[in-house]
Image: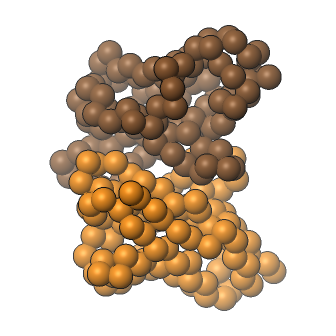
Chain colours: A orange, B brown
Amino acid sequence: GQNIDQPTEMTATEGAIVQINCTYQTSGFNGLFWYQQHAGEAPTFLSYNVLDGLEEKGRFSSFLSRSKGYSYLLLKELQMKDSASYLCAVRNYGQNFVFGPGTRLSVLP
Amino acid sequence: DAGVIQSPRHEVTEMGQEVTLRCKPISGHDYLFWYRQTMMRGLELLIYFNNNVPIDDSGMPEDRFSAKMPNASFSTLKIQPSEPRDSAVYFCASRRGLSGNTIYFGEGSWLTVV
């Protein structure tokens, strides 16, 4: 079976750092993706990991441990506009993207 | 470059009516996906195509749902007859299989069945 878990909600303060975790159990693994989705909009791509380790992209970083079935998205220097849902997704060998339930992040002033 | 284009953006229909959602993928993308998003179930895959051929339709809820891709630049998702529980946002997405990694989403079709 396929199962992806994320915390439902998180709250952080503007300027702070927040880490959003994702654990997965999937049939086949061909990459892990993070997407940002603002309310009423489509998901947009943030980052991609296929090998273990950290990928950095400006204020956003994503980490992957394939042996542990674990990833996190790190957001630094939080801004109000970062308030959104963050979706973890695993691509399996069938080219399917399986999405987690999403974590709703609220950034407070 | 144009992104994935979906229509209609919003639709309100009565139970029992037929609904057709349309999608134009990004030019050159050989994979097309239909997803449905609800508060209860999140983002779930309904069906995906590769080079216009359906590869996995195991997510299609039941026989009331059907999807076609007659050519590389057009796909439809049809619900007949529609039911209130079909109310959701339906996203179409596409990607280039060989070199591309991510999938690109359209803006979604917001369906309400009353």
* Furthest residue toward left: B98
Left or right of B111: which side holds A50?
Answer: left
Q: In which quarter of the image is the N terminus of chain B?
A: top left
Image: B56 above or below A109: above
Tell me the residue at 69%/76% (across/down): A10
Image: A40 above or below A73: above
Left or right of A107: which side holds A92?
Answer: left
Left or right of A28: which side holds A34?
Answer: right
Name the quadrant containing residue B95: top left
Q: Which of A77 and A17 is in front in this view?
A: A17
Image: A73 above or below A92: below
x and y, in percent, of residue A81 in the image: 68, 67
Image: A68 above or below B29: below
* Furthest residue toward bottom: A16
Name the quadrant containing residue A80: bottom right
Q: Can residue B2 be seen in this view?
A: no
Q: Quadrant of the C terminus of chain B?
A: top right
x and y, in percent, of residue B71 in the image: 30, 18
x and y, in percent, of residue A109 in the image: 81, 80
Q: Nearer the viewer, residue A107 or B84?
A: B84
Tell me the residue at 46%/26% (across/down): B23
Name the quadrant containing residue B2: top left
Q: Nearer the viewer, residue B73 or A64?
A: A64
Count of marks overlaid on the render: 0
x and y, in percent, of residue B40 in the image: 67, 50
Tell me the residue at 27%/70% (across/down): A50
Left or right of A33: which side holds B70?
Answer: left
Tell me the residue at 46%/42% (across/down): B45
Q: Is residue A22 visible?
A: yes
